[in-house]
Amino acid sequence: MNKLATVLLTTPIVIAAPYAAAAQAQLHPAQIQLQQNIESVLKIARNDNLSDQQKIRQIEHYADNYLDYQRIAALAVGLPWRQFSPKQKTDFIAAFKEMMIAMYSRSALLGASTTKVKLLPKLVDNGRNRIDVFTEVQTKNGNRYEVSYQLYKTGSAYKLYNIRVDGVSMVTVYRNQFNDLIKQKGIDGTISTVRAKGLKKADAIKD
């Protein structure tokens, strides 16, 4: 199974060893939040009293607090985003979110018990309220990948706007598809294609 954007949904689902209180005190607030996200959603993913659909919806509801779908969608489209009307932007964001959940949530749940993640001490402050937090993801076959989560602070929380897996950017992979679609089908045709879940997965990690 290949996955890049899967990390978007599995970030809080993968198994991670909890940090001791002393170690947590030395972490950046963005790292602490990511660790808390991992533990919170892992609890949902491992709840045997919930159906897969119930788990997906609870995870989605939780993730809504920490994922900036509007910024992810705008970055994934790129320059053509300026040509979208307000209604087209709203429709595209909703369709893009539903497409990603449909594409990756099932494999995310399946990977919850086999994928491992380790929070790395590496941290990059990009300025302009942007920060990268890094983890190492290990798949069930033992392959290891460095995953960076690009975040910005709003209020007391850090929101995710992109993911890079071994340097491969999720929004860049999707941008290539969207640029082709917009040229071929226009904006409304692109929204319809996304609504119909007609895009390919953004693949970068192999189990």
Image: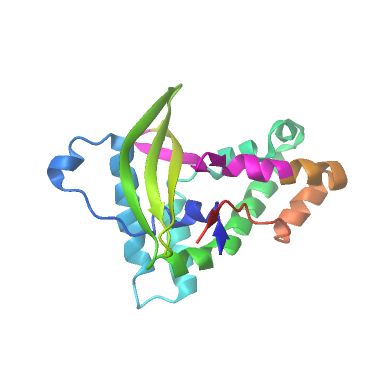
The stretch drawn in magenta includes residue 185: no
Is residue 90 in sight in this rendering?
A: no
Question: Which residue of the protein is positioned furthest toward the right in this rendering?
Answer: 184
Residue plotted at (43% across, 44% down): 146
Is residue 67 in sight in this rendering?
A: yes
Residue plotted at (36% across, 65% down): 44
Up/down of 99 relative to 49, above or below: above
Percent of width and height locating residue 129: 43, 25
The span picked out in magenta is 155-176
Question: Which residue of the protein is positioned furthest toward the top in this rendering?
Answer: 127
Up/down of 54 relative to 195, above or below: below
* Displayed quadrant of residue 58: bottom left
Residue 183 as seen in the image, left or right of residue 147: right
Percent of width and height locating residue 4: 55, 52
Percent of width and height locating residue 204: 57, 51
Residue nearest the viewer, comparing 174 with 1: 1
Up/down of 42 relative to 118, above or below: below
The stretch drawn in magenta includes residue 165: yes
Quarter placement of the N terminus: bottom right
Residue plotted at (52% across, 63% down): 105
Residue nearest the viewer, comparing 27 with 57: 27
Question: Which residue of the protein is positioned furthest toward the front in this rendering?
Answer: 142
